[in-house]
Image (spheres, grey):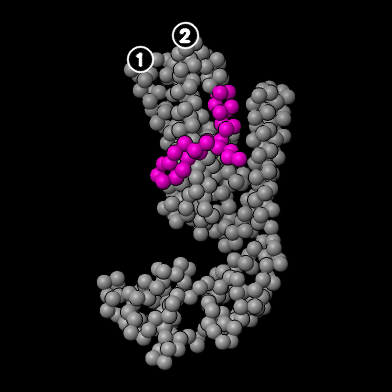
Amino acid sequence: MRTHLRLGRLIGVPIGINWGVLLVSVLLAFSLAEASLPAVAPDHPTSAYWFAAIVGVVAFLVSLVGHELGHSYIAKRNGVNVVEITLWLFGGVAKLEGDADDPGAEFRIALAGPVMSLVCAVVAGGFAWLVEDLGGSRVLVGLLIWLSAINVVLAVSNLIPAFPLDGGRMLRAVLWRRSTHKRRATRQASLIGQLLAGVMIVGAVVLAVRSSLWSGVWLIALGLFLLVAARSEWNAAAAQPELMLAPVGDLARSLPTPLGPRASVADVEGALMRTPGAVFVPLIDDQNQITELVTRDAVARIPPAQRAVVPAISLAEPLRSLPRVSPGESVDTVLTRLGRGETWWALVSDGTALHSVLCSADVDAVLEAATA
């Protein structure tokens, strides 16, 4: 059963809205029309308050989309695909197809949302000042001030370092850069997120009992959501020692189709483009035997205009210089033999045929997941 309604696409990203947002929108409109706007602009018709309230709620939803589009735009700039944006009970979420590859990109993606909210706040505040200066409607001024304030709240609340809020993701990026271990940083950030969620829940209970029942209940719900989400991230990043027994053949990368001895650097470049993740292209000799290889880094050293005329063999390295592993060997066995914390490639072969290549970076990712 579909939990949200598809609204359309912006910058190529599908936009949806969860049905629960309709209830929140009604409550926001009621609060604006019956309390907030009459307080700042008294003695206006009820219809004026309700019209402004409906416009304000729509503008707020648009600003939520803007917040998530900020994430989406920077994510795309950093090579992370965005599946969709969904508005729901506690705001919005941009569903990304995986995480960023480095902590810097993670930090920029997380920061982009609050920055967009602050931009919306400044724009709304600027229009409020302009309308006030021109002697315009007090209802409109009050609405614009509310819209500016709620975007400031949205930006500041998302900067709280409680994973998986934007601030928590920024914190994870900082911890990730310091430790170089993403899963360990995720565990640390999610632990902090759980602690802050607990503090929020306790504070919300006190608020509900002593001051505002509605605000307290809302904050309790938000705190419980953060607690569950942070706990889920904590569990997902837990150590999985059984991964050390997995066969390395499952981690190996496919090799591009071998090229002949008269191939050019441009041919190597094309082979690398056709095989995502490949780190080199094997070359065969006149006896149709794979004897040498050309790395991606070697191709990058040749100016693009010269790649079609430079022979690939001039950049070749001997294949025999690479160690070999069996596809059935375990991760633990290979690491013991080739070393941890080292950078290497190993040919995956069953003794009769060359299957693929194993990269230390892929094995290190398994090691991190096994020991997080």
Spot the residue most to the front.
1
Picture quarter with the N terminus: top right
Residue type pointed to by label 2: Pro
Residue located farthest toward the top when viewing the structure as drawn: 43
User: Label 1: few (<14), some or many (≥20) within 10 Å?
Assistant: few
Decide whether residue 24 is among the magenta residues. yes
Q: Position of residue 190 (x, y in %)?
A: 65, 49
Mark 1 = which residue? 135
Q: Is residue 206 above or below residue 234?
A: above
The residue sitting at 57% across, 32% down in the picture is: 19
Where in the figure is residue 72, as x and y percent of width and height? Answer: 46, 46
| Place of residue 35 in the rendered image (x, y in percent of width and height, measured from the top left) | 55, 16
Q: Which mark is residue 45?
A: 2
Position of residue 12 relative to residue 299, above or below, is: above
How would you rate the neighbour count of disc 2 (Cα within 10 Å): few for under 14, some for 14-19, many for 20 or more?
few
Q: What is the total number of numbered labels drawn onto the structure image?
A: 2
Q: Position of residue 230 (x, y in %)?
A: 65, 46
**In this picture, residue 213 sits left or right of residue 88:** right
Given the image, on which type of amino acid does mark 1 rest? Gly
Residue 11 part of the magenta-drawn span: yes
**Magenta residues, start to end:** 1-28
- Badge 1 or badge 2: first in the primary sequence: 2
Q: Residue at x 66, y 75 (%)?
A: 330
Q: Tell which of 206 and 217 is nearer to you.
A: 217
Helix, strand or loop status at disc 1: loop
User: Is residue 3 in view?
Assistant: yes
- Per the model, the C-alpha gap separating discs 1 and 2 is 19 Å
- Of residues 16 and 159, the one nearer the viewer is 16
Q: Is residue 211 left or right of residue 310?
A: right
